[in-house]
Structure formats: C-alpha cells, structure tokens
RNA sequence: CGGGACGUAGCGCAGCCUGGAAGCGCACCCGCUUGGGGUGUGGGGGGUCGGCGGUUCAAAUCCGCCCGUCCCGACCA
C-alpha cells in the first residue's frame, strides 16, 4: 500500500478525550474515530488489525472443529422472555420496538438465538457434539463506556456455543476451547494468563477468564508461582497468614472521636494500626432487608463473595439517610454492637482480639471490641478481597498479584438455556434430554486495545508481527532513491504486507508516523544505501538496526520476523 | 445512576473572572526552501464560540434550562 493512496490521518497531539495509552494511540495513529460514546468507526488501518485478529481466531476455531455461522444483531423479545432474561438483563440490553410495536433488542450475546436455532434442528445424540461460533458485532449499552475499544458499547466479539449429550462431552468441549484459546492468544503474540473466574450473569459453577497481562488492566489476578493456582481476585479465597496478636481480652471502652470517620483516620487518631480498626457497611437486600457487614480496616470487601453468601439476591449499599434511620449514626461511626439486623462478619476477625468498632453514635467509637463478647455474628464468612501476604488456597505458599485485561471468557452453562427453551435431543437410551451447553467469548476489538497496552513505548505502538496492520514499512529519505523504493515495494508486496511511505515529507515526519503506528520492520533507504548499497532494516521493538544487501533482504526478513 | 470536570476552526488550547472587532500552535492549500527524527520561510482558506431561552444599547463572556463528552464508582468480552 502506498501511503499517498491510503486513508491514514495521524495526529501530532493526544486528543483530550483519551485517557489511556491504547486509546490515545488508536486515535493518534488513525486506527479509529469516535462516532458516539462507545461507538467507533474503524479506519482502514484499524480495520486491518481487526481482520488480522479475526483470522487468527477463525483459523484456530476451525481447527478445533467449530463451525462458523452468522446470527442477527437484532433479536426478538420472545426468545429473551423464554429464558427470563428480557426482565433479568439490566439496562445494558438495548430494547426497542419495530413499526408494528413488537419488542426487539440489540444482541449483547446470543445464547437465546443459538439455542433457538439448535432446538429446531438437533434431534438426536448423533447430531452432537456441535460447536457453533460467529464473529460479529455485539451491543451492550454500558453505563460507562471508556478507554476507546476497551469498553465500547458496540464491539466485535467471537462467541461460540457448544452442545453436548453428556457431562463428559461438555468437559471435552470446554477443554478443547480452553486449549484453542491459549493458541489464539499465543498466535496473537500476547502475554496472557488463564485464571479461574466468577460466572456472573451466565451461570454455572466456574469459568476461566483469559487475561492479557498489563499494568493498566481493570482486573486483578491472584497467582501462585509454586503450584500454578491462578484466579480472578473476585474468586480468590482470602487466607490470612495466621498471626493474630496474642493479647488478653480487655474491657470495652467508649472513646470520643470527633469528626474521625474513615478507618485510616480512626487508626491515626487513636494511634492504632489500621488492622485493629473495623469497617461496618450497611447493605439493603432486595430493597427491603438491611444487613451489616463487618470487615477489618486494612481489608476490602469482595462483593462477589457477598453475592454468593446472599444466594445471588440483589443488594446495594444503603444510602446515608437509610443508614441514619437504621443505626442512629452517620457513616463513619457505624458498628455491629446493638444493631437490630443480620450481622455478617469477615473470617479475619475470628479470634482477633481488641479491635475498634463504631458506636452507632456520631463522634464515638468503641475500643477493645471482641467478637462473641461485644456482639454476635449471625454469620462468619470469607468476605474480603485477598491481598498481598495472603496464602494460596491450594498449597499455602504466598500469592502474588498481577493486573490483567479480560479478552476471553469460557463457561459451562449446563442446561440453563436448553431447559428454559426446551432444546432437547433423543439419547441412545430413547429418552429425551436437555442438551448440555457451554459458551465461549473473545473480545476481538478489545484485543487491539489490550495488545497496545501491552506493547508500546514513548514513540507509539509496537505491534506483534502477527497482528500488525502492515508488517513492513518502506521509507525513502530522498527522491533519488525512489526507483529503488518502488522496486522493493513491488517485490516485497508479493510476500508481505508493505506500507510504502511515498509522501514528499521530511524524514522526521516519516519516521515518527511509522513508529507511531507500530510497523514491526522499517526498511530505510538513506545514507547506508547511498554509500554502501545497503538497506537499513530497523526493528521497531528493540530499536535495533541491521544493514542488509538487497540480495539477502528477503531471507533476512523471513528470519528476523520469527522473532517478532 | 451518584460524584467531578469540560464543550471556542480537523487536533491541542488561550480569551470568559472585569460584556464592546474571535485569537494562538499544529494540521490543511499555494510558493520557495530543506532532506537521518514532526526543516525553515512567505502567503492563504477554514468558526451556528455545543443548543435554546433570558438580561443588556451590546453576550464566546452574565443568568436559566437542555444536549454532548471525558474522568472516579457498580457491569462485562
């Protein structure tokens, strides 16, 4: 591709709307342009990257025996009503009516559609196993779209659905997708980690998330180097190194703590370590029942764990007015003593002596509170987020934590959808049974952002060879080399994807642009060519330069590309 | 939806407080210049100042409402 014939508007400055590196670089590099919040145009350069990733995904899915289909973005409400998700799915489901006043939605996922398809066509165990997939736009009306392609409302997703006759089959399909996903992310040139994860709205016992490792990731992963345990922190059991201070139980004492609200402030004011303070949070379950949750001041509540304890019931933090009404105090002075509601206490407070609680009276706390003595817990449970210093649930070695961007998620669904929608098959034994399902997603457009977050420097993007929009860039620094540049361009284009910057721009502009958009190899015709007839090959990743004679060039590129 | 910020040329911003000719840098067009890291220089085009309403002789500027965007929290690939 000639640069003069390519639609590639690059920007010299960061657009003010972008915050993260990947978002800034995608806009500056002319990959995408915003249409509305969370909705983007893919320009030719961005589209090329998208197609590259798509093809890597497609190739591996096909190898796994999955069959590509295409399902509609617009979906009728009837199917969603069958599974109950028309009501259960939140506002992310964009609902609307057609001209006949019939309810429709934009598909945020396709379980209903695919299950409907399969129930109509699959009759016998002989038709199973079956894995169907598509690479198609999804729409989720996110509360807060952000970071460009990272959390867009309309985005490109690969979603796959497996159908099996028995548990053994499900397990096989799940493992097949697991290994396929590993290959896909490897082939994309990404550093990633598969972790155990929360199943969320999809249902099922457990799932795996595929995380691209990056400091800017929104998720935290707990990893054990010793035994290989890896989970999303939402799911990680919090196991303290058992080292409670040994001290006699002291008498409860009410202390004056004027205007001291946060756990940190209380600790400072009283001169105690933060772990001696507790936080009491009031939640409202299903808009009626209040509960109190007590955790240590140095710990953070894990709402996923709370959700499980509450059996999946909806809950939210109480408002300040509700808290005042229920406890008689403002947030900051709450404590479990004397509350007339269910009290759930984090396990870290079991046997923990002489801690501080709020007095449910503004400007007062109690010191030397003790579980069982000062107040009773209705339930003692693991409620907190695992944290630095906690132990691996499998092997007792210390965990460490990494940040990741979720690019894939695989689930065993069981019969959740097939039962609700009566997707059944006739088994060998002549009995009609619900089909066992699994579902498997990859955020194709999100991978672009994740790849950039993981691979960039102050000059711009550094694309892995496999997903670069062009593999080779040619820069001629003087018109006198034009003929040679043209020749190289046409010859190399037969073997690789080449972007030839044939603009009449100064060298600096060409270098800056080529670096910005992350082309892995740059061929430069300049001094070395004029003086010695050697073509300068610049490796974007390492900023290394090689000087290669034309007759060796193709071999050199083939070899070096294996390391990119 | 709650909290915060912003909206002036394609992009980045100043001007607003204290009302009185719509500016700067980059980008874009034309010329010359330069050719190893956003070359220099001369000329030029481009604006419903987010929208509507109000105050005023006069509104980018003051007031009200609305819209949009971004950031922080809950959702998710």
Image (cartoon, helix red, strand yellow):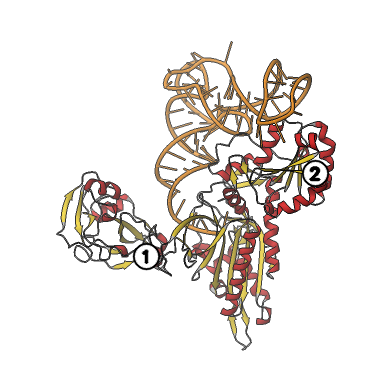
Q: Is residue A531 above or below residue A403?
A: above
**A162 or B55: nearer the viewer:** A162
Which residue is the site of mark 1? A239
Residue A469 placement, left or right of A294: right
Answer whether labels 1 and 2 touch (C-beta < 8 Å). no
Total marks drawn? Answer: 2
Q: Which mark is residue A549?
A: 2
When asked about the image quadrant of residue A547, the answer is: top right
Mark 1 is surrounded, within 10 Å at the Cα level, by few (under 14), some (14 to 19) or many (20 or more) other residues, namely: many
Q: Chain of mark 1?
A: A
As drawn, A450 above or below A341: above
User: Residue A549 vs residue A174: left or right?
Assistant: right
Q: How dense is the environment of label 2, judged by Cα within 10 Å: few (below 14), some, or many (20 and up)?
A: some
Q: Chain of mark 2?
A: A
Percent across and percent down for residue A452 are 60, 48
Give the secondary structure at mark 1: loop
Q: Secondary structure at mark 2?
A: strand
Q: Position of residue A196 (x, y in %)?
A: 50, 65
Q: x and y percent of residue A75 in the render?
A: 62, 61
- Residue A66 lies, with reference to residue A271, above or below; the image says below
Q: Quadrant of residue A172?
A: bottom right
User: Which of the 4 quarters of the picture holds residue A390?
Assistant: bottom left
Q: Residue at position x 19%, y 57% from top?
A: A368
Whether residue A476 is visible here, answered yes or no, is no
């Amino acid at each position: 591709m000639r640069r003069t014939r390519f639609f590639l508007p690059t920007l010299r400055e960061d657009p003010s709307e972008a915050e993260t590196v990947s978002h800034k670089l995608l806009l500056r590099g002319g990959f995408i342009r915003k249409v509305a919040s969370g909705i983007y145009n893919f320009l030719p350069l961005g589209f090329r990257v998208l197609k590259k990733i798509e093809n890597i995904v497609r190739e591996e899915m096909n190898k796994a025996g999955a069959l590509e289909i295409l399902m509609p973005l617009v979906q009728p409400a009837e199917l969603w009503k069958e599974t109950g998700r028309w009501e259960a799915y939140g506002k992310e489901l964009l609902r609307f009516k057609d001209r006949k006043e019939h309810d429709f939605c934009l598909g945020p996922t396709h379980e209903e559609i695919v299950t409907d398809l399969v129930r109509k066509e699959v009759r016998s165990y002989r038709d199973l196993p079956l894995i169907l997939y598509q690479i198609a736009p999804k729409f989720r009306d996110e509360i807060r779209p952000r970071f460009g392609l990272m959390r867009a409302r309309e985005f490109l997703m690969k979603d796959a659905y497996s159908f099996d006759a028995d548990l053994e089959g499900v397990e096989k399909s799940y493992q097949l997708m697991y290994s396929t996903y590993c290959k896909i992310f490897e082939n994309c040139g990404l550093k990633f980690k598969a972790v155990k994860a929360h199943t969320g709205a999809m249902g099922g016992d457990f799932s795996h998330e595929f995380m691209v490792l990056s400091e800017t990731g929104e998720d935290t992963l707990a990893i054990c180097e010793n035994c290989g345990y890896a989970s999303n922190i939402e799911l990680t059991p919090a196991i303290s190194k058992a080292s409670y201070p040994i001290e006699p139980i002291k008498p409860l004492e009410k202390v004056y703590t004027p205007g001291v609200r946060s756990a940190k402030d209380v600790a400072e004011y009283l001169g105690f370590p933060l772990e001696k303070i507790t936080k009491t949070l009031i939640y409202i379950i299903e808009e009626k029942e209040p509960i109190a949750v007590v955790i240590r001041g140095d710990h953070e509540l894990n709402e996923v764990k709370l959700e499980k304890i509450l059996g999946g019931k909806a809950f939210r933090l109480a408002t300040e007015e509700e808290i005042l009404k229920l406890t008689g105090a403002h947030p900051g002075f709450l404590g479990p003593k004397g509350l007339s509601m269910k009290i759930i206490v984090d396990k870290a407070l079991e046997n923990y002596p002489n801690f501080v609680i709020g007095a449910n009276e503004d400007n007062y706390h109690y010191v030397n509170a003790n579980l069982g003595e000062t107040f009773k817990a209705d339930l003692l449970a693991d409620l907190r987020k695992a944290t630095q210093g906690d132990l691996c649930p499998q092997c007792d070695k210390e965990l460490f934590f990494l940040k990741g961007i979720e690019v894939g998620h695989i689930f065993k669904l069981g019969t959740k959808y097939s039962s609700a929608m009566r997707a059944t098959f006739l088994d060998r034994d002549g009995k009609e049974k619900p089909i066992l399902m699994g579902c498997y997603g990859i955020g194709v457009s999100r991978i672009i952002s994740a790849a950039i977050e993981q691979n960039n420097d102050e000059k711009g993007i550094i694309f892995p060879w496999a997903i670069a929009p062009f593999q080779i860039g040619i820069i001629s620094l003087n018109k006198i080399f034009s003929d040679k540049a043209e020749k190289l361009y046409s010859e190399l284009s037969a073997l690789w994807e080449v972007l030839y910057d044939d603009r009449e721009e100064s060298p600096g502009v060409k270098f800056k642009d080529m670096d910005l958009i992350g082309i892995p190899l740059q061929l430069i015709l300049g001094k070395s060519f004029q003086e010695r007839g050697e073509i300068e090959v610049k490796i974007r990743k390492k900023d290394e330069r090689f000087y290669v004679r034309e007759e060796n060039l193709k071999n050199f590129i083939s070899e070096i590309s294996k390391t990119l």
